[in-house]
Amino acid sequence: MPLPDASGPREATTRLIAHGCWYPSADPAGARVAFICDRGGVPQLWVGPVDGDAPRLLDDGPDPVREVSWSPDGRWIAYTTAPGGGEQKRVLCVRPDGSDRHIMAGAEPGSSAHLGCWAHDGSAVAVTVAVPTEPPPDTTAEPALALVGAGLGRAADRLSEHGHGPMGDAVLLDAARLDTAPYADHGLALPSAPTDREPGIPSPHTTVETLTADAFGDRHPAPAAGFGDGLSAYLVDPDGVTAPVLLATEQDAATLRVCDLSRDGTLALLRRGPRGRREAVVLRITDRVTTCVTPVADGDPWIGAFSPGADTLWLRSDAYREFAVLLAAELDPEGQPRGWSVGASRDDSDLELLRLAHDGRAAVLAWNVRGTSDVEIFDVATPGAAGSTGVTAATGITGTAEPSSGASRATAGTTETPSERSRPVLELPHEVATRVADAGPGRLLLALSGSQRRPGIWWLPGGVTMVRTPWSSADEDAVPPGRPPVRPVHRRLTARDGVPLNGWYYRAPGRNPGEPAPCVVYLHGGPEDQERPVLEPLYHEILGRGVDVFAPDVRGSSGYGRSFVDSDLGEGRFAAIDDVADCAAHAVLSGSADPSRLAVMGRSYGGYLTFASLVWHPELFRTGVAVCGMSDFASFFQGTEPWIAQSAAHKYGHPERDRELLRRLSPMSRIDALRAPLLAVHGEHDTNVPPGESEQFVRAARERGLNAELLTLRDEGHDFLRADNRRLFRRAAADWLERHLTG
């Protein structure tokens, strides 16, 4: 049975009834919402009234939209796109009526840009620009020259009304425009190079010592990977009247995002570091002094915010503990922490979303409770909410001066505070909250997903009763008529070494409860992702072919504590591969799955685990489907994006120092053990896991006389974002599993 053609003519774009809406951002009055929606077949930027049914498409271009942010003054909407569906991104701005659309950053070939926060008066938006690291330039050059070639586009270079202009051309900032005088009124200044007595954020050509906390609270230097992008964060005027202001730069950096600016423009909250070693950095803008550095949790990049008076910093942090909590730092007028306290925490649950209301009186907290969400509103305005609960050097986190950096770092435990400031948990109509946005005084917007619905946006106008926005898909439109979505069942099991594991089991409809069924073990990416009980069209397609789906969280997944996330590091990855086999055994021993009709499938890191499971446990699985997976760590590190390599080195091992370990962990090193037929799927523009990872595994399998096929999806990167490609992928994967498990 041949695979479908992925390169032929495309169907005309049609409006999708079963569409998803996500990533809301409201205007200052909370009357209109900018959001991402795929009703046109690709994630695009839309805007609509919160209580009306007439949304408008603002960008009809072919590039998927990834993030959206409405300016506090209501004049602009900033958003990011992924050209060609790949990993490199651009930041654009557009008026709410769709006019004056232009590129803010990421226009230069080879560069990538990331959206940060807005200044609270809407005068500038923070943008991080990533460019491949080059040899250090002449350090005696004028600071203004650092912006040339950084990938910032001229705000004056507007896109045409119906076209996208020369999107692939380099648009460089004219160094002569770097006049810092217009920012004086905002308390901002272009930072000068640090002196021996003026520490601050290092330049792109300075190695940064990053400290991390292990499960026991000890801090130690984390080895730099020695590769990565140079990242520079700027404040950019969307009107193009004033020149960009350089906030911070780092060399060989995995991430650098501006998460918040104080109302008076004197402090910036940055998030930096590779996954597993994220840090919050408080930067005093006027003199570039770093006043505070502390570990924060992975997951949502919006890690926290300043209070309106900048006297308190609220963070989502797992510093020195298993699960992320609401952490508060009382700040002095210079931005130095006076003391730390825990505002809210839960046993065995991570704080995964934190949103501070615009008036600073309340915070919305979303807790991850074994994959589902609990959302509560927390009072942060009560006196003593942060720092005044008796935090001492003996019992609370304290700041200690470090001569090498001039910053304060968290160095001990925290004081717990009562939880009586929390209101009752909101009654969510669906299982998982993916984003929380302010929608005016006393009002909220929540992006929700669930096992019975497509992603949608819900409005909380007051009280605790939520209302679905009219332009979000209705639940009855989630799937075509005739076969409702399957609600999964939570499963608990124990790995061979005693580690507890969890997962969600989807039973194909129409099958008797005691009848063993063909089953595919589906593995998520990350590895730090987590399987959530949300509607997955791929699962719906597979279940319709009479095949069960078991989606476990093997070690390395998030949601179960930091020790579990780190349990697959180094040699522990071999245990994660064994977890896949143990999950398959659980499905069989529970009576759900037929041991002779098992398959394994996964995407990204799950694709790696698929390759690995087929060569480490070839006797278990009849077939496999690997999607965008790594097959050899040496070639992966050579071909991936530098910032991804920076993070991956911490998670998988350093490509030089841990070369032998990575060789033993690579599925290609055991290709001779492969016995099962394999389907590999990859996006042609994937620069996260390059397509060569699938190509070499399929080629090696064919050389050994095995049935192996490769489906390459055009105009896609690491994530499949276009409706026609997603449909093609789902049907090809389901056809393959049906043929090998039920045929």
Image (cartoon, rainbow, N blue to C red):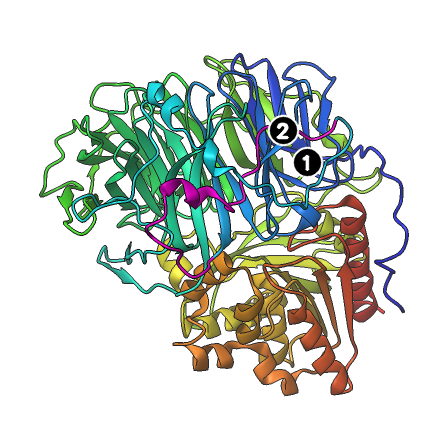
Identity of the amino acid at label 2? Phe
Judged left or right of residue 12, residue 656 is left
Labels 1 and 2: the sequence-earlier one: 2
Q: Vertical placement of 195 versus 73: above or below? A: below
Residue in the foreground of this view, choosing between 357 and 713:
713
Residue at image coords 65%, 58%: 686
Identity of the amino acid at label 1? Arg
Q: To which residue does mark 1 refer?
A: 453
Q: Which residues are magenta?
A: 133-160
Judged left or right of residue 154, residue 535 is right
> Could you tell me if residue 166 is visible in this image?
yes
Q: To which residue does mark 2 refer?
A: 35
**SS category of the residue bearing label 1:** strand
Q: Residues within 10 Å of mark 1 (few under 14, many from 20)?
A: many
Residue at image coords 26%, 27%: 312
Q: Which mark is residue 701?
A: none
